[in-house]
C-alpha cells in the first residue's frame, strides 16, 4: 500500500545473521528479503552492529542504513519509581521478602548473552564470604527465557534467596527497580 501511494517506508527489525543456517527455510527467507522486501524499503533503522551486518549481508546499500539503537526514557522511569515508592513494602510482602534484606535485581531475557548464570554464581560466592550476622541478599530474576530451568536448578541450593518472578511488562518494572538495592 505504501509503494502504491509513493509513501517511503522505514524498516526496523531485530534480525541478525544466524551462524551456519542454510536450510530450506533460511534460503526462502533470504530470497524473500533480497527479492521482495528490501528493494521496497527506503531506509533501514539498524539497532546495532549485528543488525547492520544483517542488512549489509542482504545487499542493503550503506546510504540506506541509519543507526536507531534502543533508547530508554530515564526521566519517565525515575518518575515511575518515585510513584511506586509508597507501595514498596507491600511489594516486598507480596514477593515474601523479609524486611531489611538487600535485594539484587536482574531484569532481562534469560539468555546466554545476558549472562544471568554469572550473576547467580557471583551471589553464590558472595554468600559464602558474608559475615554470619550479615543479612544475606535476595536475587530476583524478572524475565523469562531458555535458561530459566537451568537457573532454577542451579539456584535450589540457595533456598529462598533466589526468586524467579517471570516476565514483567515495562509498566511493572519501576516498582521492582525501586524495591532493589542493586540492579
Image (spheres, rainbow, N blue to C red):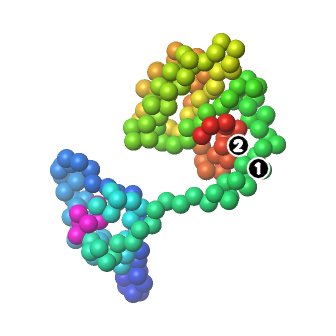
Task: Decide if residue 24 is in sight here.
Answer: yes
Find residue 159 and report its image quarter.
top right
Within-10-Å neighbours for mark 2: few <14, some 14–19, many 20+: many
Find the distance from the CA under tag 1 to the CA under tag 2. Answer: 7 Å
- Quadrant for the C terminus, please: top right
- How far across and down, in percent of the image, does residue 83 sit? 78, 50
Q: Which residues are magenta?
A: 54-59
- Quadrant for the N terminus, please: bottom left
Q: Which residue is mark 2?
A: 178
Of residues 55 and 27, the one nearer the viewer is 55
Q: Residue at x 47, y 34 (%)?
A: 116
Relative height, residue 42 to residue 11 (above, below): below
Q: Which residue is mark 1?
A: 82
Relative height, residue 145 to residue 121 (above, below): below
Task: Decide if residue 165 is in sight here.
Answer: no
Q: Residue at x 64, y 21 (%)?
A: 136
Q: Residue at x 50, y 38 (%)?
A: 144
Find residue 133 and report its image quarter.
top right
Confirm or deny contact between disc 1 and disc 2 (CB under 8 A).
Answer: yes
Q: Residue furthest top?
A: 132
Q: Which mark is residue 167?
A: none
Amino acid at each position: 500500500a505504501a509503494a502504491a501511494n509513493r509513501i517511503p517506508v522505514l524498516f526496523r527489525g531485530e534480525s541478525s545473521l544466524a551462524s551456519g543456517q542454510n536450510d530450506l527455510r533460511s534460503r526462502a527467507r533470504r530470497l524473500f528479503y533480497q527479492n521482495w522486501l528490501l528493494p521496497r524499503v527506503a531506509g533501514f533503522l539498524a539497532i546495532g552492529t549485528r543488525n547492520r551486518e544483517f542488512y549489509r549481508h542482504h545487499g542493503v546499500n550503506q546510504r540506506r542504513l541509519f543507526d536507531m539503537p534502543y533508547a530508554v526514557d530515564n526521566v519517565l522511569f525515575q518518575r515511575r519509581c518515585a510513584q511506586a515508592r509508597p507501595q514498596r513494602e507491600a511489594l516486598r510482602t507480596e514477593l515474601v521478602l523479609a524486611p531489611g534484606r538487600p535485594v539484587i535485581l536482574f531484569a532481562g531475557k534469560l539468555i546466554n548473552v545476558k549472562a544471568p548464570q554469572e550473576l547467580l554464581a557471583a551471589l553464590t560466592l558472595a554468600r559464602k564470604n558474608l559475615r554470619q550476622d550479615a543479612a544475606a541478599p535476595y536475587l530476583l530474576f524478572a524475565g523469562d527465557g531458555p535458561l530459566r530451568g537451568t537457573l532454577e536448578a542451579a539456584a535450589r541450593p540457595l533456598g529462598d534467596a533466589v526468586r524467579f518472578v517471570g516476565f514483567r511488562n515495562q509498566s511493572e518494572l519501576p516498582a521492582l527497580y525501586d524495591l532493589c538495592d542493586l540492579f
